[in-house]
Structure formats: structure tokens, C-alpha cells
Image (tube, rainbow, N blue to C red):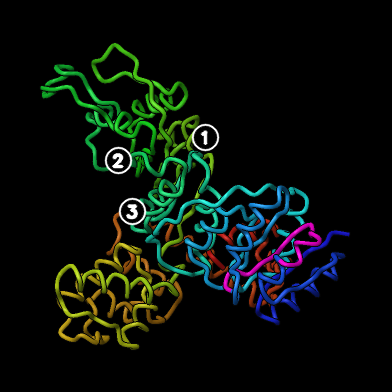
Amino acid sequence: MHKIWIADDDEAIRIVLEETLNEAGFETQVFETGDGLVKQLESESPDLIITDIQMPGMLGYDVLKHINNNFEDLPVIVMTAFADMQAAVESFGGGAFEYIPKPFDLEEALQIVERALEDKPKTKGLKKDNKLDIIGESQAMQNVYRAIGKLSNTIATVLIQGESGTGKELIAKSLHKNSPRHDMPFIALNMADIPKELVESELFGHEKGSFTGAVDKRVGRFEQANGGTLFLDEIGDMPLDSQTRLLRVLSNKEFYRVGGDKPIKVDVRIIAATHQNLNNLVSQKHFREDLFYRLNVIKIDVPPMKDRKEDIDDLSKYFLKNYSDSLDEDLRVLSEDAKNIMMKYDWPGNVRQLENVCYWLTLMSPNQNVKAQDLPTEVKEYEIVDVPSSSWEDGMKNWLKNVSLNIDSGLSEIAITKIEKMLIKTALERSNGKKNDAAQILGWGRNTLSKKMKEHGI
């Protein structure tokens, strides 16, 4: 029988975990503090440890560090109610098998326990602390934090997918800052901003006189990023002929400058991002299938703002404070009525749009205490457009019209996502939260339902 130790200063958590694990056939021992658990390790050791982060005395990170320094093969699962990216990075960087934000699903926690006991992973060693600027503790962001944490000791190729304005470059920078290449260059290039005829020159550089206007030799982004990370934003906009050259570089780790005849060796980690569906682009022959599989080693889906509205308050405070300082203006504070309207708005421009609104309020709001009437027109009048109409079709038309005014592309993806969320929530309400019954109501398999619930942060 496997022995599992639990350290948490919350008695309710200890009792629930103890009962759940005992019913599953495990032997458990509980501790109110990390100090008590570490003291017990002097005389015996379990097969698995589950520890909270915030406890009186020794923190969960300290428990993790102690185990890392003294035990070769003892898996640790970290729990925390303070679910931000720093916690995820420090947990995984410290060698944790898994990081579980509270509140958690007991069934999923039990599956993680069983995986940890089966895999018996070795701890990895603490990484240096990095200040990170990704804000939000919403459930929709937990998969992002978990992915960044798990990738913190690797140089794996990553594809970041999400709507425009969701913060894909910030996530790419965090992946780089928490990688073994953190002290090497991070070079970003947005493919949508480059004229087609200049893409290869930007990526690979050119020799003097290689084309009209090439008056000097130019070092490309691959050379600039050598030893570090190259972030290719909006990779779906890369021309097909450039995709072929990129694939060759990824395969051979060498390239030629435009107009050059000497191969240049590079060691570069690639992180790519897109707001487009690359699978669809592959089907339409606009994106190379072999390059897609080369880039899609690990995918991180970034949730849109409408799926993480509980983060609006923290994000707004952060942006308003930043703009107050940089513009030397009085600090604006959102009133409750302004917050309520902002929570109802769907933010089609995502975090970038929220940041722009905070900039606008810092300059334009007549009151330090921002009221509902002080908000920009597109935000405060959203409810008028979104009111129920004579039929659901009319309501949907009005909603689509409003969203389309704030975006340049991706309307169908936004609408489909919203409809899927409504379908899932309706089925779960009807089934009283039972996933099997909800999946049957929807006509989906349980795995499909679970996958889509995770995608949509439900």
C-alpha cells in the first residue's frame, strides 16, 4: 500500500484529501505544518508528498527544496490558493511533479496522485527567481501557468495560439526568461508586419549588393538570436516559400544569407504564435503540413479576455497604476458600477483593448473615481446592443455586429467559442454537473466534453 503524506494548515483540506485517498486504498498521514513533515522525514519517508505552499513556518517551497536536496526519488505535488504564474514556475522549477490550484476537483487530484506514483519522477533543482508580469488568477489561465512552469527547464519548441491581443508575446518572453537560455538573446519578429519580399532578408540577413537597396551586409534575426530564442509572431502569415526555408533551418540548423554562398550554423529555440487556425491553413494549402508538425511540438492555448473576466479588476489596477506613473496623472480608480459594466463587456480586443481603455481613462476621465458614464462609448453602450430582442436570431445578429466593429478577423472563431460555452453550460446545468450525462445530452464523448471544458476554462 502506497504511503502519502499531506501538509496543509487548512484542516478542511486535510480531512477531504485524507478521506478521498483512504477510500482509494492509500495509507495517509497529515501534517499541519511543513516543519512537522520534514521532521518526520528524519525517521521514515512516504511514496508521495502533497504540500500546500502558504503555511506557518516552513513554506511549501522550502519543503520542496529540502526534498530536492535530500531525496533522489520522492515525488511532490504542490497545492496553492494563490494561483499565479510565479507559483507554477517556482513549483515546477523546484521539482514538483504537478501544481494544483485551489479549489481543485477531487477526481482530477486523485488521477494526478496515481500518475505521480506510477512515474516516480526525480526532482530537478530550483531555478532562480524571475519577476513575471503576467497578471491574473482565473481558472482559464491555470493551464497557461502550468504549461510555462512545466517548460521552465526545457528549450522545447512551442506554438502559442490565441486571439489577437491576448498576450502571446508576453508568454513567449516568460518561456524564455524561465528557460536555460534566459541570459541569451530573445528576438521577436512579427510576420504580419513584414512585406513578403523582405521576409527572408529579415530572417536570414543579406549580403551587400544581393538585391536593389542592399547597400550593406545585414545580419538576420536567426543570427541575432543565436544561442537564445527567436519568437515568430503571426507565423500563419509567413509566405510559403519562406516556410520552406524556415523548415530547412529547423532541420539542419544552418542557412545562407540572401545572396550568400557560405552556410551559417545557428542554435536557436523557436517559439511561434498565431491567432489563426493552422490546421485550417494546412487544409487550404496556405501552410506547410511538415512545418506545422515541426512547430506544434507543444501548444499553449491562451484564453481570450471574455473567458477570464475575473482578472479584469487586477489587470485594470495594474494598467491604471502604470499609466498614472508614466503620464504623471492622478491615479484613476474604477467605481463598482464601472466595474460591473466592464465585467459584462466581451472585450473582443482582449487584454490589449483593456489596456487601451485604461490609457484612455487616465487621460480622459473627468473623475479620479471612474464612473460608468466615464467609460468609452463602445464599452458603456455594449449592454444596449446586447439586450434580448424579439428572437434569438436577432439577438445573435446584434451581438455579431457589435463584435465585428472591434476586430479585423476571427469573427467565426469568436462566435463558435461563445456558442460552445453556452452549450456546455446548458448541458451541465441540466445534468446537475454530471459530465457523462452532459456529454450524452450534447451528443459528444466524455473525453471531447472534458477537452472542450478545459479549452474554455469551464
Residue 437 visible in the displayed image: no
**Marks 2 and 1: which is nearer the front?**
2
Q: Is residue 401 above or below residue 234?
A: below
Asked if marks 2 and 1 touch (Cβ < 8 Å), the reply is: no
State the CA–CA distance, disc 2 to disc 1: 21 Å
Of the numbered discs 2 and 1, the one sitting upstream in the chain is 2
Question: Foreground: 456 or 360?
Answer: 360
Residue, far top: 261
Amino acid type at image mark 2: Leu
Q: In this view, does 224 lie above or below 369?
A: above
Residue wearing tag 1: 293
Crowd class of label 3 (few under 14; some 14 to 19; many from 20; radius 10 Å): few
Mark 2 or 3, nearer chain start:
2
Query: Quarter-wise, where is residue 203 in the image?
Result: top left
Q: What stretch is highlighted in magenta?
A: 39-54
Q: Earlier in the sequence, mark 3 or mark 1?
A: 1
> Which mark identifies residue 409?
3
Q: How far apart are marks 3 and 1 (CA)?
A: 24 Å
